[in-house]
Image (cartoon, rainbow, N blue to C red):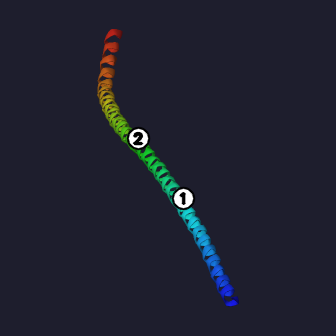
Amino acid sequence: RRERDEALKAKDDMAEQMRMMVVRNSSLERSLKSAQEQRDVLEKESAARAKIIESQRQSGLDEMQSELEALRHEIRQRNRRDGDLAQRLQVGHESIRTAIQQQAQSISAAMDVIPALDTIHQSVVKTLST
């Protein structure tokens, strides 16, 4: 009877240990499932943040590209205006140079005529005084 009681006690102890292991195993499975769910949530949040960051980065790049194109367009327009202005200045300088040369020729011609006019003037004055 004592052996039987000891065997029953051992059997009950083993059953209790089994129940404890089942409870512990169940608790560990719940903890594992909870940890996996948290990991999945964190991975989704991380992926969403990465998409937002990539979208912001791409938006910034697109904005900078637009600004760069606008600056390039402005540079092309200024270069055209500067080219037009340089051409107009060159034409103006050429016109001034031509006018100065013509004026110099007119002055030179006048310098050639003045001595002849002096001679005529003196002749007229001489004729009138006699």
Which residue is at the front of the view, 87 or 70?
Answer: 70
Element type where label 1 sits in the image? helix
Q: Residue at image x 33%, y 14%?
A: 126
Q: Residue at image x 70%, y 89%?
A: 2
Residue lying furthest bottom: 3
Q: What residue type is labelled 2?
A: Ala
Q: Which amino acid does label 1 sit on?
A: Leu
Q: How many labels does the image show?
A: 2
Which residue is at the front of the view, 94 or 74?
Answer: 74
Answer with the quarter of the image where residue 1 lies. bottom right
Give the spatial CA distance, label 2 vs label 1: 42 Å
114 left or right of 9? left
User: Residue 20's x, y, as percent?
Assistant: 64, 74
Establish if 95 lies above or below 36: above
Q: Mark 2 points at which residue?
A: 70
Establish if 91 lies above or below 120: below
Residue lying furthest right: 2
Element type where label 2 sits in the image? helix
Q: Name the residue under label 1.
A: 42
Mark 1, Cα crowd under 10 Å, few <14 / some 14-19 / many 20+, is few
Answer with the quarter of the image where residue 115 lies. top left
Establish if 103 lies above or below 2: above
Task: Quadrant for the C terminus, please.
Answer: top left
